[in-house]
Amino acid sequence: MAKSKVCLIVIDGWGISENKHGNAILNADTPVMDELSHGEYLTLDASGLSVGLPEGLMGNSEVGHFTIGTGRVVYQDIVGINLAITNKTLGSMPSVVEAMNSAKNKNGRVHFLGLVSDGGVHSHIEHLKALLVVAKEAGIGHTYVHFFADGRDTAPTSGVNYVRELKDHLEHIHYGVLATVMGRYYAMDRDKRYERTKIAFDALTKGVGERVQVDNLIKTIEERYGWPEGKRESDEFLKPIILDTEGMIRDNDTVVFINFRSDRMRQIVEAVGIRPQFPTDGCVLPQNLSVFTMTEYNKDFPFPILFPVKTPINTVAEWLSLKGLAQYHCAETEKYAHVTFFFNGGQEKQFPLEDRCLVPSPRVPTYDLQPEMSCHGVAEKMVEAIKSGKYPFLMCNFAPPDMVGHTGVYQATIVACAATDRAIGAIKKACEENGYVLLITADHGNAEVMIDEEGNPVTKHTTCRVPFCMHGGNFKFCKPLHNAGLSDVAPTLLDLMGVGIPSEMNGVSLLEK
């Protein structure tokens, strides 16, 4: 039995800004949210580190709902790796220790392979530099780097700068050898163009490529930049350069792939660690390799993972299910996954006693043509569920501020915000009549910044804080001593319900004690 019944509304794309210029929220007729903002009201951080993203990065619907529903900050791959480096825990992570022990116990050889740049989309050069330090400290005798050049997430001819940076690092730590250089076009194909993967594989295992002395590497790459049109090679398209034939992948070697993004690693990892999907010209392939990957590239790969994905347990949905309490999740089509899959911690499964309701989104080319979308349909379903008395916990998403905001049509977004406010009003009234505590927040900002200073439309999310309103009962918010964020929503609502807060949640209740 819940102490209090709770209804949670997540408004999509409703941030807080006092600047009225281009602010579809402040310039809309929103009497319900205006009233609630003068009651029990806090603001929450919905961007950057508060939702597991790099500092300063705008939030998004997926990570916002994930953080709200799990009650914890789960760092995205790049952030988790960065923190392990900053906190000096990289070398003690179980799979990193296993990789180093593998190299020491077998033949004293380890290879690091991956994209070497600071693009931050697939990998980061700082991760490679940190792993090299770990290998040195572990006493690995021979360490080789296989440099996949970028040129897509970085400037097309910036690769020489990263070569210089890596060479300087190797000289600084007096450790490691740069063995090969090749463009991501070959090493990171993801479209089953195995003829490209074969070129990278042959370079890594057989030394097929242009033989170059490491002192001439930068000159060689710059010459390729300057080749005539049709022959010219930018970073992405660099054909393999072989710098040290001792650095080819051999029997019993330990091989570590350093990209944290999975999609463009699968083909080359499969070729090296399992079997090539292309002819090998009768050559004997390296045997008894120990392969490690930075993250999970494919759930069917058998390799140890340095930073494994952990499916969160005891999310709001799972916790209430375990307590035997019925719950109701509702959204229109555009945001249905967010109140189910993402709110439930990245899990497709529907927990026992969890009911779901999908309201079809309007079939229009762009949502500025019907800016209210289906928010009134969602409100009607929520009111019906509240009145049923069946559910101690209900939650829904209102899509219009975000989805219409993304069109860049300012006046339509004003209409979207006003319609959303009316829908919230209907739910608020039902909560008052049926004894529910109403909580309202947002997953990220958007509609509050629609026009820039030059008068151009803005369609992206923002880093603005979002509201957290509480209405009903005699509860009050505390004055947070920390940077309150979306991870605090779940502990707060569970505290209201009196069902305990699972230890896995690292957010805190914002109720006054």
Image: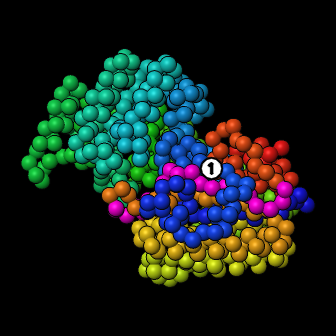
Does dot 1 land on a helix, a strand or a loop? strand
Q: List x then y, in percent, for residue 368.
A: 45, 76
Q: Residue at x 35, y 23 (%)?
A: 169
Crowd around label 1: few <14 · some 14–19 · many ≥20 (10 Å) = many
Residue at the (67%, 55%) spot, across then down: 468
Residue displayed at 30% across by 49% down: 152
Whether 500 is among the magenta residues is no
Which residue, given by chain and number where applicable, does mark 1 sit on?
44
Check if residue 470 falls in the magenta segment.
yes
In this view of the protein, which residue sits in the foreground, 421 or 247? 421
Between 69 and 112, the residue placed more toward the observer is: 69
**Residue 493: x, y in percent?**
77, 55
Tell me the quarter of the picture where residue 41 sits.
Answer: bottom right
- Tell which residue pokes out farthest to the bottom in this image: 363
Position of residue 360 relative to residue 428, above or below, is below
Residue 203 sits in quarter: top left
Q: Name the residue furthest left.
A: 228
Residue 94 x/y as whole percent: 61, 32
Does the magenta stretch mainly form a helix, a strand or a loop?
A: loop
Of the 4 image quadrants, the one containing the N terminus is bottom right
Q: Amino acid at mark 1?
A: Leu
Mark yes or no: residue 339 visible: no
Q: Which residues are magenta?
A: 455-474
Instruction: Write the residue at 42% across / 71% down.
Output: 409
Q: Nearer the viewer, residue 150 or 206?
A: 150
Residue 232 in sight from this viewpoint: yes
Left or right: residue 451 versus residue 498 is: left
